[in-house]
Amino acid sequence: MRARRPRTIVIGHGRDAAPVAEAFARAWPGIVLDVVSWPEEAASWLRQARRFTAGEPDAWVVAGAPRGWAGMSERLRRSTGWDPARTYGFAATAGAVALAPPGTLEGMRGADHDGNTWRIGRNVIFREPS
């Protein structure tokens, strides 16, 4: 994420990941436009998706369980201008690739608990040693 040098970000998280998202927001040296939470299950996630993409940030940062992020990311792809290639996730979010429709998360990047990075292809996670 540092290599791309985003100045403005929006942070999104499942409800259980609120402490992680809040800590990241406090530590971020740039501008946090918004912090958006979503439930693990929702009828549509449309309200959260619109808020998540409002303000046109340089990047998005996500934390949370795979199931909620899979649902939210599917709504983002169908209903907004969200770009997974400008999205960075914490370790658990990579698991959403198995639950989201093919290609939904293609281009997303993140980091594991061990410090290694990953990026998502069409239906696969590529792990990259740090």
Image: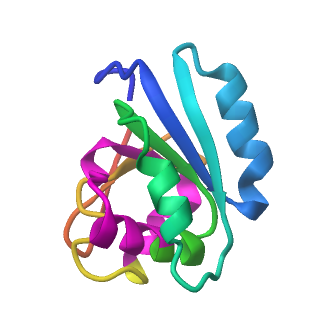
| Horizontal and vertical percent position of residue 43 | 57, 86
The answer to whether 72 appears left or right of 29 in the picture is left
Which of the 4 image quadrants contains residue 3?
top left
Taking the view exactly as shown, the residue that stands out farthest to the top is 29
* 54 on left or right of 58: right
Is 71 located above or below residue 84 in the figure?
A: below
User: Which residue appears at 52% of the width and 15% of the height?
Assistant: 30
Q: How many marks?
A: 0
Query: What is the quadrant of residue 68 in the picture?
Result: bottom right
Q: Is residue 127 magenta?
A: no
Q: How is the image coloured?
A: rainbow
Q: Is residue 114 above or below residue 45?
A: above
Residue 64 image point, x, y percent: 63, 61
Which quarter of the rendered picture does the C terminus lie within? top left
Drawn side of residue 30 relative to residue 73, left or right: right
* The one of 127 and 43 positioned closer to us in this rendering: 43
In the image, what residue occupies the spot 32% across and 68% down? 79
**Which residues make up the magenta segment?**
72-97
Q: Residue at x 48, y 70 (%)?
A: 46
Point 62% across, 50% down: residue: 36
Magenta-drawn stretch, dominant element (helix, strand or loop): helix
State the image coordinates of residue 63 (x, y, percent, origin top left).
60, 53
Q: Quadrant of the N terminus?
A: top left
Q: Position of residue 100 (x, y in %)?
A: 38, 80
Considering depth in this image, is 89 or 74 the residue closer to the camera? 74
